[in-house]
Image (cartoon, coloured by chain):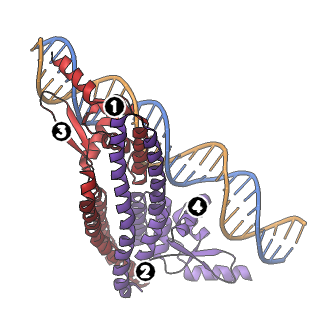
Chain colours: A purple, B red, C blue, D orange
Amino acid sequence: MVRIFNESKSLSSTTKFLVEWESAIIDLFLNASQSFGLPKSLGQIYGLLFCRDESLSMIDIMELLSISKGSASQGLRALKQLGAVNSVFARDDRKERFVAEIRLRKLVSGFLREQGEPHLEKGLARLENLRDLLDDEEDFESANRGQRRENILSGWHRQMSRLLPWVKMIVGKSDRLSKKSSE
Amino acid sequence: MVRIFNESKSLSSTTKFLVEWESAIIDLFLNASQSFGLPKSLGQIYGLLFCRDESLSMIDIMELLSISKGSASQGLRALKQLGAVNSVFARDDRKERFVAEIRLRKLVSGFLREQGEPHLEKGLARLENLRDLLDDEEDFESANRGQRRENILSGWHRQMSRLLPWVKMIVGKSDRLSKKSSE
DNA sequence: AAAGGAGTTCAAGTTTTTTTGAACAACTTG
DNA sequence: CAAGTTGTTCAAAAAAACTTGAACTCCTTT
């Protein structure tokens, strides 16, 4: 009984193959993903969800993209972490289902939060470490040169820290304006 | 005669080993390089040049970093391409010598020019290709869904294109303000 | 024009990253 | 609670990226 229900639902709502333009979009995201330094599979999975109106289960994704369970599981976890996909839980169904986040503002801020901010923090720790090393430097010339470099790096760090909020703001603003056409 | 001159010059101006804080900075750039999706050796080379006041030849770089001729050559080419290092030609010397570009504005705009803009152009080409595929789509439902996706992607493309000039501007502005401390 | 230095190229080797799939854990159902 | 489903983990395999070094080009010097 339940089985019949599930099958009929799948047939009615989820096309079990990719049409040509969907493959093109998936390939587009695959490339984009790599240029952002993320694994290909993240791009593929996101691209697939981006194409579909209905939510997909992990198994749908594995089958449509011909990727392994492991890739699908890890890819979806990373995408959730980035805020690029959201889970949907349908009652009557034990499976978790996924949809793509299509608000650019959310995508960008998730990316900056997960990829940008950690690097800035790590950079701060490294600068502190550098200051410690400079305190121990005996040679005056060298210590002086190191100090000048430390100043430059501190300045860069400050400027990059200031940049991130602006990026979020600029993308966010345009996003809200263009929302009418996509939602 | 010439040999003696060159040797004495090298000894007086270029320390033939790395001090501790220099290694720390080189390591910092090595990591930064990777998080920007660039090869490690680019970061190492840039980091070394960043530390030194005097220009270095390719051979100096190979020796100080213990990297191969090939890496040094390719790394320096990529860094020049990015605008992150500049060549200096000393007369009396056939070797090309290099110095690091330390103006953040230049570094950021070079990076965006070489990494950001090409991706935006490629994206535009892909969008055109996508439109062609959609024109050929027979199924009405599918074509309609594809059209909605194409609209979203076009919007994103527009917004990202607008973002780049802002980033250059924001970093450029702060850079000019903090210039007094580094130059 | 031979010898030598500076720099480039690229096929082969090395390292790093990504993907796979089998084993496992957690839950439901009959 | 045995059997079935969903999803995670991680060691090993595969793929991708990076580095090396020998061969080569182009200059300059003797």
> Which numbered disc flags the more N-terminal residue, 2 or 3?
3
> Which numbered disc flags the more N-terminal residue, 1 or 3?
1
Q: Quadrant of the N terminus of chain A?
A: bottom right
Judged by depth in the image, the label closer to the viewer, 2 or 1, is 1
- At which x and y percent is residue B33? 39, 49
Q: Amino acid at mark 4?
A: Gln
* Tag count: 4
Q: CA distance from mark 4 to mark 3?
A: 48 Å
Q: Which residue bears the numbered disc 2?
A: B142
Report if the CB atoms under discs 2 and 3 are less than 8 Å apart. no
Q: Which residue bears the numbered disc 4?
A: A74
> Which residue shows up at 35% across the image and 36% down it?
A140
Residue farthest along the bottom direction in this orientation: A180
Judged by depth in the image, the label closer to the viewer, 1 or 4, is 1
Q: The residue tagged with tag 4: helix, strand or loop?
A: helix
Position of residue A164 in the picture relative to residue B121 (left or right): right
Q: Amino acid at mark 3?
A: Val
Q: Disc 4 is attached to a residue of which chain?
A: A
Q: Amino acid at mark 2?
A: Ser
Q: The residue tagged with tag 3: helix, strand or loop?
A: strand
Q: The residue tagged with tag 1: helix, strand or loop?
A: helix
Judging depth in this view, the residue of D22 and B58 nearest the camera is B58
Same chain assignment for discs 2 and 1: yes
Q: Which residue bears the numbered disc 1?
A: B62
